[in-house]
Structures are given as C-alpha cells and as structure tokens.
Image (cartoon, rainbow, N blue to C red):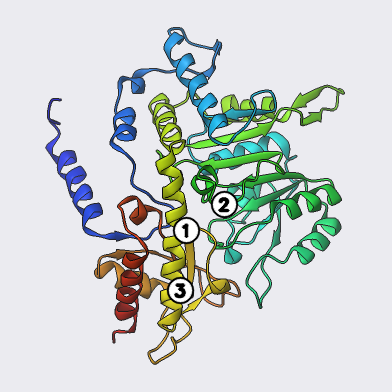
C-alpha cells in the first residue's frame, strides 16, 4: 500500500496510535478494534452512495452493497439469536445518538413523554435529558436509583410510570454498573401502556458473549452502538419487533420497523456509510466466535477485580460493585485510611498525567457540577482486549489509589 502523502495528517495518526499504545485505557465507551475492522473502514466502499434500502435504492450500481447490507443484517440477528420473521434490524444509523433519535421520531409523538434514567443516576443524554434534542422535542420523565442501595428502584419507577403514562420507557444506561431487570421493565411498560425500548450500547458485547442478560425477550425495540463492548466501528444498530404496529389517523397500521427505517432515511440522514456497515459486519462475525465469549466473561471478571481492589484500598464504589464492564467511583468522599476527596475533573486530570485514561462522571445524589462532578467512570473492555487479567487490574487499582492520594 502506498504511503500517505499528507504528512501532517499521517503524523497526527501516528501520534494518536502511539498515545493509545502508551496509556492504560479505562474509558468505558472505548475499545480496540481488530485489523480486519480497520481494513473494512478504509476501503472503496467509501466511494459508494446508496440512499434507500436493499432492493429499494435511489441510485444505480447497488448490486454489491445490497448484498453487504443484507449480510450485515443477517449477522446482527444471528449474533443475538433472533429470527428474521420476528425481528428487523436497521444497520444504517451512523451512531448511537441518532439511532435513539430515530426511534423516538418514529414512535413517539412530538411533545410526548420519554421515561429514561436521569443523567446523574446513570442515564444517557439521549434518554430525554434537557440539553439533548431528545429533551427538547419530547418531555423526559426521569427515574433513578434508591439512595441507599444505588440500584434502580423499580417500585418507584412503576408508580411514576402509571401516574405519568409515558409513551416509551427506555431501559439501559451510560453509567450504571448493575444488571437491569428487563422482565420488570416489561411488566411496568405493560402496566402503563408504554413501548419498551432498551439501549444496550454499553453492554451489547456482554449480551453477545452470554455474560449479561439479553433484553430481546422483553423489549419492543433495542438500540446499540457497536464501538463499546461489541468491539466494532463507530456505528449503531436498531432492532425492532415486526409484530408491533402503530395505527395512524387514517386507520392504517404501520410496523415499528417500517416507521424506524423511514425515520433513519429519509427522516434523519441520507445514504449509509457503507465502509462502516462493512466494518460492523466484520465485528459481528468476530463477536460470534468462542474466543469472544471468553473475552466477554473476562471483561466482567476484570471489572469485579478492579472494583474490589479499589474498595479494599478505601474508596467508595457506587452500589458497592459491578455486574458489568463499568465502575462508578466516588472520588469526592475522602477515602478510608487518610487522604482528602477530590472532584472528578481533578481525579481524571491526575490519572491522565500518570498514563491512566478515565472520564469524570456524575454519581447518584450528585451535589457538584457535571463539569466537575463527584466521581469518575472506569471500564475494563479496552484493556481486556489487550490481554489483561484480574491480577493486572488489581495493580491498576493500586496505581489509581497512589495517584489520587498523592498531595
């Protein structure tokens, strides 16, 4: 392959490659993709414009990319054990936020109600938070965690859902370390007449690896990014039940899948990024391997080891531990054994100087600003990809402790 002629960009790419290799990456929403995924991203598929869907394009020359998109859909359903007669999957969404936006645009009337986990309790911006478009076009009905256990309060959630009657309930998180009870969410959605959507962006790879419960038995719609625990490119998938419909004012029934596809294109975007679609297909095949199942299990083992060691060292871990790949750590509360607490921004900055990359994060009962919150979020997916095991994460915890206690 010919060397890149743009030396400035080449130097920046090489600098970023060097940076990534030189740090311990504990960003819960990042991972390290394979060479095959990278190769798929940098192909001539970038040159093709393909507005529409397989067999229904607005441009010519789609005989190859129609096969590519259909193959990607088949691999997505196969990975999660879904029957094509019951589930549709849209593989064109460019990333997680527009995927969630597409679902709301398709299924929730403008001004309607989205019931999602509040930001400081672990929810995502696109679960209806006020600064997101999803909180401007729709009204969020937030739910949260029990202040004592710091786990989802399903009793309060049900009471609020019945009182508010949201159009859609969003299960899933961006910073919640525990297992979500999808069966309870299904019962709550049924009790208030809501659609149940699960955003499994963070734990999709764990579901694929049979290391975390699957939401598909209970959800009407499931969205996910591909670049977190699923270890793929920056893209998204939207799964929808084919038997679920909405009847319009003229009395015509449209399936969720039909409405979602129209919301993605032409509602929100033009032609798909076919190089991304190809890279998604590669990642889905990799995630179907026996090796990936071992990887998913190891991610959780590593997270548990990291959380346990940090607790032993005197730090408060939100909810007392983790069932997934991520950990929320309270840095504002002074650690046991001496030392002062510090804000999440300072904690993140200190760790980065020491070669450990994390992100500042709000915690339940947050009293500080999101710009400088009370905690940090840690994830184990990327370093597990690099081969680290429990003993390595215990050492990482000790290094974190040393850096944060230093004055």
Residue 84: x %, y % from top left:
64, 24
**Disc with the residue nearer the chain's start (3 vs 1):** 1
Q: Is residue 228 visible?
A: no
Position of 280 with respect to 207 (left or right) is left
Cα–Cα span, label 2 and label 3:
19 Å
Position in image of residue 397 (x %, y %): 36, 73
Residue topped by disc 3: 308
At mark 3, the secondary structure is helix
Does the residue at mark 2 contact the one at mark 1 (Cβ under 8 Å)?
Answer: yes
Residue under pointer 2: 212
Q: Mark 1 points at which residue?
A: 300
Query: Which SS class for mark 2?
Result: loop
Q: How crowded is mark 3: few (under 14 residues within 10 Å), some or many (20 or more)?
A: some
Mark 1 is surrounded, within 10 Å at the Cα level, by few (under 14), some (14 to 19) or many (20 or more) other residues, namely many
**The one of 122 and 295 positioned closer to us in this rendering:** 295
**In the picture shown, does residue 84 fall above or below 357?**
above
Quadrant assignment for the C terminus: bottom left
Whether residue 10 sits left or right of residue 230 in the image: it is left
């Amino acid at each position: 392959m010919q060397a890149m002629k743009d030396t400035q960009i080449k130097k920046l790419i090489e600098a970023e490659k060097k940076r990534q290799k030189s740090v311990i990456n504990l960003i819960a929403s990042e991972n390290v993709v394979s060479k095959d995924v990278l190769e798929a991203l940098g192909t001539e598929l970038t040159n093709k414009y393909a507005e529409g869907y397989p067999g229904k394009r607005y441009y010519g020359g789609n005989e190859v990319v129609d096969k590519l998109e259909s193959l990607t859909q088949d691999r997505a359903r196969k990975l999660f054990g879904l029957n094509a007669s019951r589930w549709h999957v849209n593989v064109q969404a460019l990333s997680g936020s527009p995927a969630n936006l597409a679902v709301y645009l398709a299924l929730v009337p403008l001004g309607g109600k989205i019931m999602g986990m509040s930001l400081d309790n672990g929810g995502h911006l696109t679960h209806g938070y006020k600064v997101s478009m999803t909180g401007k076009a729709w009204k969020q009905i937030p739910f949260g965690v029990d202040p004592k256990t710091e786990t989802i309060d399903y009793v309060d959630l049900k009471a609020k859902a019945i009182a508010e009657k949201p159009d859609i309930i969003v299960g899933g998180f961006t910073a919640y370390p525990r297992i979500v009870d999808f069966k309870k969410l299904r019962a709550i959605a049924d009790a208030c007449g809501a659609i149940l959507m699960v955003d499994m962006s963070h734990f999709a790879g764990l579901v694929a690896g049979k290391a975390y419960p699957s939401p598909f038995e209970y959800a009407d719609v499931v969205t996910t990014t591909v670049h977190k625990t699923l270890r793929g490119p920056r893209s998204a998938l939207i799964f929808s039940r084919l038997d679920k419909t909405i009847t319009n004012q003229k009395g015509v029934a449209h399936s969720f899948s039909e409405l979602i596809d129209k919301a993605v294109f032409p509602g929100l975007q033009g032609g798909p990024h076919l190089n991304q679609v190809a890279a998604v297909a590669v990642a889905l095949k990799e995630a179907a391997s026996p090796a990936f199942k071992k990887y998913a299990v190891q991610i959780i083992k590593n997270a548990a080891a990291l959380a346990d060691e940090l607790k032993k060292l005197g730090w408060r871990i939100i909810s007392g531990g983790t069932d997934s790949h991520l950990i929320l750590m309270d840095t504002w509360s002074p650690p046991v054994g001496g030392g002062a607490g510090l804000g999440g921004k300072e904690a993140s900055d200190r760790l980065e100087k020491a070669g450990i990359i994390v992100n500042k994060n709000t915690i339940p009962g947050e009293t500080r600003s999101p710009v400088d919150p009370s905690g940090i979020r840690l994830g184990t997916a990327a370093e597990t990809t690099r081969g680290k095991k429990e003993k390595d994460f215990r050492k990482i915890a000790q290094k974190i402790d040393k850096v944060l206690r230093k004055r």
